[in-house]
């Protein structure tokens, strides 16, 4: 017997967990699941891989570089030695010449070119990743709208249930009055019609809730149904200043301009390499031996391309224009964001002011409705008078519900506008 009781208790706990744990969702949980399941998130790993490959390829510039070359030529004239000596035959070069060789180059000093290329790849990757963060951040606003829309519908469903109870109470009172002969059956038909109207509102609300659930389910990649309950969040503290990911994106783009500017200086620096060349051809190094021979040569090579000095000033001017354009975009973004935050702050204050009077209106409407019930029971007022007071109280409660959810949604909109870093 004891084991059966224990089993029943465990089963009840499992059912409670399923009903009250598995299907309860907070706004933060919805945001996290949406971020993880959004298809664009896969791009982050691709950006990281691309950065690793690019930096690794740039670093290979420090390794010896091997090139293979070959050529065959025919020339109209060759070098001749205009000396004739008795008994000595001076060889003549052939007009057709052949050469194949390999050259190994090892950078000794590259002016910092490879280092800056690696920095450029890292900067580009950082910008791409932050741009992805901006796109994913915009997902928060869509989840907020769905979440608070569902909260609004749930509260409206609760109020619809209370309205239905009030109408049913009036129906019971009118039935008693009909029995006592103080009311007509037509009065009952009026209340029945209002009850059906409340039922239609219930159908509309449930249909809207289902539509919201299906869309949110796609974002979360989680099945949601009528058993799902959404926990109303509490208002958070307002952040100080704008902390949107777009600000970091602007800063990373400005840092990228600095990297490109350093790369301009690097291009105009000299290069020093060690090289070794080995090959086989005719003629080889000794042109007086016009036959195929192997050869090699090695040493140091200094290279300094001064052509970049001609365009260096203009290249810097182009980068400076890009920098000013980015700073103008950043300033415009901050101006618009602060403007939106100010408007949202005014909206929040409006809802707070409305809520202060909502409670008082509900108390008064509730008193009037209770009086109307007693009057209806004694036949002092008509059913239409009673329903008018019931609907007035219902509207007052709905106004309070709407204002509460709108205030909460507005507070989270403010956080989204200014940058919710939570």
Image (cartoon, rainbow, N blue to C red):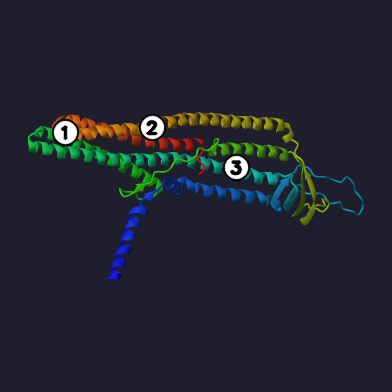
Counting from the top left corner in percent of width and height, residue 169 is at: 19, 40
Is 391 above or below relative to 114? above
Instruction: Give the number of the mark in front: 3 or 2.
Output: 2
Left or right: 127 with respect to 95? left
Residue 14 placement (x, y as % from top left): 34, 60
The nearer-to-camera label among 1 and 3 is: 1
Q: For this view, does 49 lie left or right of residue 115?
A: left
Q: Which image quarter: residue 206?
A: top left
As helix, strand or loop, the secondary structure at mark 2 comes to helix
Q: Nearer the viewer, residue 406 or 181?
A: 181
Q: What residue is shown with label 1? A: 376
- Up the image or down, 40 lies above or below 280; here it is above
Residue position marked by numbered label 3 in the rendering: 124
Q: Residue drawn at (36%, 31%), measured in percent from left and top?
A: 357
Q: Dot 3 surroundings within 10 Å: few (below 14), some, or many (20 or more)?
A: some
Q: Nearer the viewer, residue 355 or 288?
A: 355
- At horizontal 58% and vertical 44% (from top left) the residue drawn is 125
Mark seen at residue 365: none
Nearer the observer, 162 or 292 = 162
**Label 2, on which residue?**
356
Place residue 371 in its image quadrant: top left
Label 1 sits on a secondary structure element that is helix
Give the CA distance from mark 1 to mark 3: 76 Å
Q: Secondary structure at mark 3?
A: helix
Q: Earlier in the sequence, mark 1 or mark 3?
A: 3
Tell whether label 1 touches label 2 (CB within 8 Å): no
Picture coordinates of residue 200 (x, y %)?
A: 22, 38
Q: How much space separates mark 2 and mark 1, taking CA atoms?
A: 31 Å
């Amino acid at each position: 017997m004891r084991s059966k009781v224990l089993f029943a208790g465990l089963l009840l706990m499992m059912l409670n967990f399923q009903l009250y744990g598995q299907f309860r969702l907070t706004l933060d949980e919805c945001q996290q699941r949406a971020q993880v399941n959004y298809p664009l998130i896969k791009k982050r790993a691709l950006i990281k891989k691309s950065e690793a490959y690019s930096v690794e390829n740039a670093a290979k510039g420090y390794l010896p570089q091997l090139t293979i070359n070959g050529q065959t030529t025919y020339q109209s004239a060759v070098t001749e030695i205009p000396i004739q000596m008795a008994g000595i035959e001076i060889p003549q070069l052939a007009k057709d010449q052949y050469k194949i060789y390999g050259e190994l180059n090892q950078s000794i000093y590259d002016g910092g070119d490879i280092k800056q290329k690696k920095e450029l790849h890292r900067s580009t990757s950082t910008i791409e990743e932050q741009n992805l963060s901006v796109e994913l951040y915009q997902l928060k606003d869509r989840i907020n709208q769905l979440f608070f829309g569902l909260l609004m519908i749930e509260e409206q469903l609760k109020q619809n249930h209370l309205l239905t109870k009030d109408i049913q109470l009036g129906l019971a009172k009118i039935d008693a009055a009909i029995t006592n002969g103080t009311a007509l059956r037509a009065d009952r038909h009026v209340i029945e019609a209002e009850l059906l109207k409340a039922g239609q509102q219930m159908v509309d609300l449930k249909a809207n809730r289902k539509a919201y659930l299906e869309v949110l389910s796609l974002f979360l990649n989680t099945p949601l149904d009528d058993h799902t309950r959404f926990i109303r969040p509490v208002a958070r503290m307002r952040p100080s200043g704008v902390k949107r990911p777009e600000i970091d994106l602007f800063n990373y783009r400005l840092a990228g301009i600095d990297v490109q500017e350093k790369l301009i200086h690097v291009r105009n620096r000299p290069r020093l390499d060690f090289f070794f060349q080995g090959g086989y051809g005719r003629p080889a190094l000794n042109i007086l031996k016009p036959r195929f021979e192997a050869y090699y040569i090695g040493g140091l090579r200094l290279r300094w391309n001064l052509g970049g000095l001609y365009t260096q000033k203009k290249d810097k001017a182009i980068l400076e224009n890009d920098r000013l354009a980015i700073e103008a975009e950043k300033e415009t973004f901050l101006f618009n964001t602060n403007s939106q935050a100010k408007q949202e702050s005014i909206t929040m204050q409006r809802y707070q002011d409305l809520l202060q009077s909502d409670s008082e209106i509900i108390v008064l409407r509730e008193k009037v409705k209770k009086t109307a019930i007693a009057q209806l029971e004694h036949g002092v007022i008509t059913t239409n008078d009673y329903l008018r007071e019931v609907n007035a109280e219902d509207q007052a409660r709905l106004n309070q519900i709407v204002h509460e959810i709108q205030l909460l949604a507005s507070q989270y909109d403010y956080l989204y506008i200014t940058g919710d870093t939570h």
